[in-house]
Image (spheres, rainbow, N blue to C red):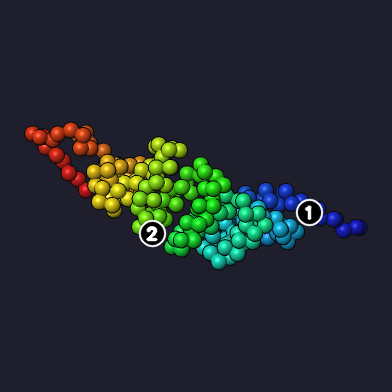
């Protein structure tokens, strides 16, 4: 009897790897990505996705190595640049994160997550006015983006611009930053009308 020949099907392996990855089975997905990489060592898409997988596993240095190699092969990858920025921001390497967010936005000016994250990095660097510019750019793309509104509120407050800050602060309910919205029969007072002769109910 002749031995069966095992066919190598890279498309099927890649599809299976993605399914495992999306299902959170990272170690199993990693094995399949590495099989593909053995056959296609200069395939930048595989290098990038493997780098992201390492970030998800908490292996920052390995993730940086794979994505940097990918970017050396093809520097015009907004997804790879964005994920580098996210990981560097998480590790508080803020100046480096800013560089990668800037490159991401150059390639994709409408990447609202990169724009907001850029604003947050600038806020953490205490470059508050520049942070506000990023949040305004994000809101020009999506005027109802709660994360942009919330971070804008915090930045105004940090600048001592309390009237502007507290108006935006209500967006914290939508963004989840202020917890779950409390339900009361009384209407919410947002400072738009006089409370003279009325009772103001405060709650924590």
Q: Which residue is at the far right?
A: 1
User: Can residue 30 be seen in this snapshot?
Assistant: no
Q: Residue at x 25, y 51 (%)?
A: 160
Assess disc 2: are there few (<14), some (14-19) or many (≥20) residues with their C-alpha within 10 Å of its C-alpha: few
User: Can residue 102 be seen in this snapshot?
Assistant: yes
In depth, the one of 129 and 141 nearer the eye is 129
Q: Is residue 31 left or right of residue 203?
A: right
Estimate the x, y position of residue 64 in percent, counting from the top left: 57, 63
Estimate the x, y position of residue 60 in percent, counting from the top left: 53, 64
Give me the C-alpha separation between circle 1 and circle 2: 50 Å
Q: Dot 2 corresponds to which residue?
A: 125
Estimate the x, y position of residue 129 in percent, counting from the top left: 35, 50
| Quadrant in which residue 184 is drawn | top left
Residue 8, label in figure: 1
Q: Earlier in the sequence, mark 1 or mark 2?
A: 1
Q: Residue at x 16, y 41 (%)?
A: 201
In depth, the one of 55 and 23 nearer the eye is 55
Task: Decide: is 60 above or below 100.
Answer: below
Q: Secondary structure at mark 1?
A: loop
Q: Is residue 76 left or right of residue 163?
A: right
Q: Is residue 191 left or right of residue 173?
A: left
């Amino acid at each position: 009897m002749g031995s069966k020949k095992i066919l190598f099907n890279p498309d099927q392996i890649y599809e299976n790897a993605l399914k495992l990855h999306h299902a959170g089975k990272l170690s199993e997905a990693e094995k399949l990505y590495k099989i593909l990489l053995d056959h296609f060592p200069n395939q930048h898409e595989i290098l990038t996705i493997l780098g992201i997988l390492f970030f998800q596993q908490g292996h920052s240095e390995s993730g940086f190595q794979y994505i940097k190699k990918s970017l050396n092969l093809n520097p015009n990858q907004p997804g790879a640049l964005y994920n580098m920025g996210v990981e560097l921001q998480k590790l508080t390497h803020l100046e480096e994160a800013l560089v990668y967010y800037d490159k991401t936005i150059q390639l994709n000016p409408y990447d609202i997550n990169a724009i907001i994250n850029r604003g947050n990095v600038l806020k953490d660097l205490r470059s508050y006015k520049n942070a506000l510019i990023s949040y305004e750019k994000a809101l020009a793309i999506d005027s109802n983006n709660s994360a942009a509104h919330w971070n804008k509120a915090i930045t105004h407050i940090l600048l001592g611009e309390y009237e502007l800050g507290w108006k935006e602060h209500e967006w914290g309910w939508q963004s989840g930053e202020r917890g779950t919205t409390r339900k009361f029969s009384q209407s919410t007072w947002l400072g738009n009308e006089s409370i003279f002769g009325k009772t103001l109910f405060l709650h924590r």
